[in-house]
Image: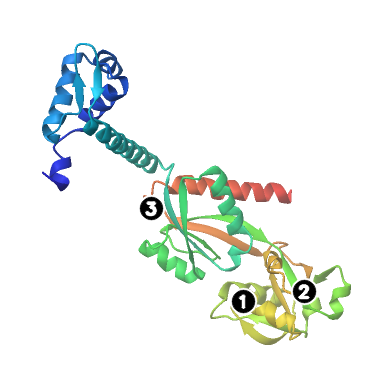
Amino acid sequence: MTGASFWSQFELRQLRCFVAAAEELHFGRAAARMNMTQPPLSRQIQLLEHVLGVKLLDRTSRAVKLTPAGRVFLLEARRILRLTESAALATRRIASGEAGTITLGFTAASGYSFLPRLLLQRASHAPNIDVALKEMVSSEQVESLLTGRIDVGLLRPPITRGEFTTIKVASERLVAALPFGDARLGQASLRLKDFDHQPLIMYAPEGARYFHDMLTALFEAEGITPVTIQSLSQIHSMLALVRAGIGAALVPEAAQSLHFDDVHFRAVETDPPQPVELFAAWRTDNDNPALAGFLDLLRQDESDAVAALD
């Protein structure tokens, strides 16, 4: 008898009875440990020996000893019991939301600051929840949430889908990225009027719609007209052009962590003071048990960020 048909012939209870007897080497103590009497314990071990076709224990009136086959089988029986116990524990944890996997979409800019902080929170507060990361622009995240490819998205507003629940998880200031030698480096902070009729590396409307529309609205509100010399969708590419002296750029403050040589940052006064917003979104009908615990991490991270600002 081999394969699955062999293993299906005995029960976990028989293994537990055998392991108890093998470890105690005394049927009375083994029966007490199993919370049963000796006759049914002996019967379970006899059934196991019958299925295996070998004798596992030598029992006399004076002693109980493991046979050579019994010593080998004890190692395997312990391994099987450990596997079943760990499988049961993992299943309960997943069902309760204590463990599991969350597939998380994120924009490149959110990976500069918020995402690393969130992953550190997960490691310390929810180590049994794994996070599978998917870098996507906001529009792709919306589609992926609808189709179930991701559980949660870290994306930019507006988020208008009625199927989603959202929370704001971060707000950032804008900072000016200025090249070496720029006259505005002599100022501790800047205002938007400092960019009027000045060369500016702008966001592309087709690839960075959120930042393009946000800056356009801020400029229009103050009657400011920068000179757009390039329109790009990736912040690191914009900073590379700043380093080359092509012009200035306005970027979220977390972009300062990219550390480009000869790119210098200055705070920019805007209304509102923190115009760059990041939201978490998920389908309201998402039934992933790990979602509730992960959302607790998001809310905790948001609370910590607010406290730090206060």
Residue positioned 55% across, 50% down in the render: 298
Q: Where's residue 256, x and y in %? A: 71, 67
Can residue 47 be seen in the rendering of this structure? yes
Separation of marks 3 and 2 at Cα, in angstroms: 42 Å
Q: Which residue is mark 2?
A: 192
Q: Is residue 147 above or below residue 47?
A: below
Q: Which residue is mark 1?
A: 212
Q: Residues within 10 Å of mark 3 (few under 14, many from 20)?
A: some
Disc number lying in front (1 or 3): 3
**In the figure, is residue 228 to the left or right of 101?**
right
- Residue type at tag 1: His
Q: Secondary structure at mark 3?
A: loop
Q: Where's residue 231, x and y in %? A: 63, 84
Q: Where's residue 7, x and y in %? A: 17, 41
Q: Is residue 8 above or below residue 189?
A: above
- Residue type at tag 2: Leu
- Residue type at tag 3: Asn
**Number of numbered discs present?**
3
Q: Residues within 10 Å of mark 1 (few under 14, many from 20)?
A: some
Q: Which residue is mark 3?
A: 286
Residue positioned 36% across, 39% down in the render: 86
Q: Secondary structure at mark 1?
A: helix
**In the figure, is residue 60 to the left or right of 262?**
left
Residue farthest to the top? Answer: 61
> Which quarter of the picture shows residue 278?
bottom right
Foreground residue among 80 and 282: 80
Residue positioned 16% across, 18% down in the render: 40
Separation of marks 2 and 1 at Cα, in angstroms: 15 Å
Q: Where's residue 143, x and y in %? A: 41, 68
First along the sequence among labels 2 and 1: 2
First along the sequence among labels 1 and 3: 1
Foreground residue among 71 and 198: 71
